[in-house]
Amino acid sequence: RDIKYIPLRASTQCWSRNCLDGRTTMMSTIKACTGLVVLMGAMTMSQGFYLPGVSPQSFGEGDPVKLKVNKMTSVHTLMPVDYYRLPFCQPKGGPKLDSENLGEFLAGDRIENSPYRLKMKTDMFCEQLCVSNLGRSEAQGVSPNKMVRAIRRNYHNNWIVDNLSAASKAEDDDTITTRYWQGFPVGFVASDTKKAYIHNHINIEIMYHAVETQTEKFRIVRFTVEPFSVKHDITEIKKETDDDDTSDEEQVIVATIKNPIESCDPSNEEKVHTDYDMITYKNREPQLASGQVLFTYDVKWTENKELHWASRWDIYLSMDDAIPAKVHWLSIANSLVIVFVLSSMIAAILVRNLRRDFHRYNRIASDEEKAEDLEEFGWKLVHADVFRPPSFSPLLLSVCCGTGAQLFCMGFLTILFSMMGFLSPANRGALIMALLLLYVTMGSVAGYVTSRLYKALKGKAYQKATTLTAVGFPGICFGLFFIMNILALTQGSSDAVPFTTMVVLLVLWFGISTPLVFFGAYIGYKKESVEFPTSTSSIPRQIPDQPWFMGIPFTLFVGGILPFGACFVELYFILSSVWTSQYYYVFGFLFMVAGILVVTCAEITVLFVYFQLCGENYHWWWRAFATGGSTAIYVFLYSFVYFKQLHASNFATYVLYFGYMGLASLALFLTTGCIGVYCALWFNKTIFGSIKID
């Protein structure tokens, strides 16, 4: 948690050195693995730093503390809903939306004020909030009310105090469990009656820490919510009037409770906080999610001298050690084993064969060998065709590689900044903002890579290639986002962004990204074309029949399974963060896994391209792209496996989940495909530039 991670530049360079020397490559592999292990050990002992993104706020005793409410979320529907869409108590003057950044809007966050009154170091006991009519009772053949539907869909509230998300405490006869993600449930469905009950009483527990540099100032370091369902028998409801001006020091009484629990009994001289024993005392019943319901809450302040403000997010980011760090270490060890096996395979097969081929191709042939025309066989036979432009759409290949390079730069910089602590979860929406802005600013990279590759492939439609790069993948993203936005509107979800946000996205696309793509393409086209070590003949060489294991299905199967095996553990945690509102902050592990993914994609692509050239098949451009990108196929297939644990039954949920997972898989396919093409191109230029061509 909060570890200062170190980029692995030095260790990754050794994979590309001395690639033609078997012994040196093996030693480089061993050194790289050893250095990586030592580096990871040093990372665990290093002292981290915390960049929360917001300055600390100090409160004096009795100062008001705002409690804000965010969207309600559910792992069953994946459709967040605005808090006040349900008949909860509203603040005077109605709810007001907080100022939000673009990332928060895109994430579906809707942070609003609430009627809950909190004061620093001031305990409150069974404070009455309001009486709300939740709607008709549950009955067979009758459509349930909004609150019942939300409870049955397992919606959770997400509250915020001093920019700190609420942890949820659950208590039963034997255990007390605190969870630091997903908020707290709106209610529950009883296992015996099968009816929905609402949590209408909330215990708000806040820990604070005294500011060492200021006197009589305090900072909030922990925010926990314990929900209860209490059936308050109401006998009299006070009517609200416009001239009702209750002092902040007075307790608000909105109803008279018949047979109250101990904490809500005004006749008790000694005030006590609500606890689990009171709720279950003498067969007290929970509150059904229907009819007139009184909402109450307690506030309990506790000083924590050990927990400082700078460390208050630690338990959230580690999710209270719900996922041990050992799991990530085992994932890294698994990935390193795959890299070692793959590198050993290349050292034993590829490098050994290449050394033998170089020796045979570069030696001077005898007159007898020349007469029998035996001096050439193997991959040297395709030297006049190996750099021939692909027969299918060189323009599309260039556009895909340019977009992949743009996505690679975006992902690399985002993980790097996150690893350094700049994208803190305390700054909501920062990660989405970083992804969006980095993608837009990396448009020049997409234009440059597209133009350089397209020019090397003898393409002439420069403007068409540049335009497709500028509008191709962004157009797919915007089109899908527009469809999902319409779907969210039909479902009444807070995922639906306003029209002004759509306009902002269009401005970023056409006002910044597109000009940068054309600028990068202009620089790329102005440069000299990439020179290949061999010339291309005018007549293509005939390709012999290929064995079954060099077909596209087999190469896609093998080419994707090894890189996927190196990263699927971290993929599970990332999907949990995206779809189940869990925190993911181990970006140091993610940085290493991403590096291992790049290495494995590069190595497996080079290996298959070599086998393909040995079979005298020079159509390697698209094959290299597909082999490198085949990892994305496994990621998309794995999304079906992960979807089972969400227990979703709504059609809109299927469209939302698989739509965005398909888009993410497409982005990964373009990224790893670009890596495969450029590694294969470097490999071919290296080996064909190392032999003599008659």
Image (spheres, grey):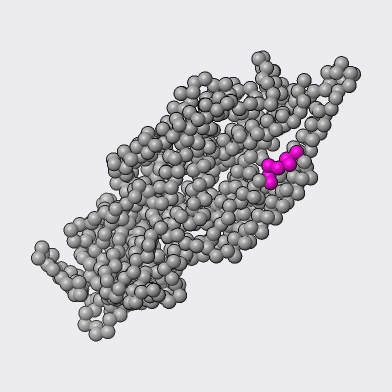
**Vertical side of 633 occupied by 279: above or below:** below
- Which quadrant is the C terminus positioned in? top right
Residue 171, picture quadrant: bottom left
Give residue 424's position: percent from left, percent from top: 44, 57
Of 686 and 499, nearer the camera is: 686
Of 372 and 84, nearer the camera is: 372
Give residue 682's position: percent from left, percent from top: 65, 34
Residue 340 falls left or right of residue 436: right
The verdict on residue 632 being magenta is no
The verdict on residue 15 being magenta is yes
Which residues make up the magenta segment?
Answer: 14-20
Of 298 and 66, nearer the camera is: 66
**Vertical side of 269 occupied by 299: above or below:** above
Q: Residue at x 68, y 44 (%)?
A: 15
Q: Residue at x 64, y 47 (%)?
A: 12
Give residue 583's position: percent from left, percent from top: 46, 57
Does residue 344 show up?
yes
Residue 649 falls left or right of residue 639: left
Does residue 140 show up?
no
Give residue 492's position: percent from left, percent from top: 29, 46
Q: Which residue is drawn at 36% across and 61% down?
A: 163
**Is most of the magenta stretch helix, strand or loop?**
loop
List the single residue furthest toward the top. 539
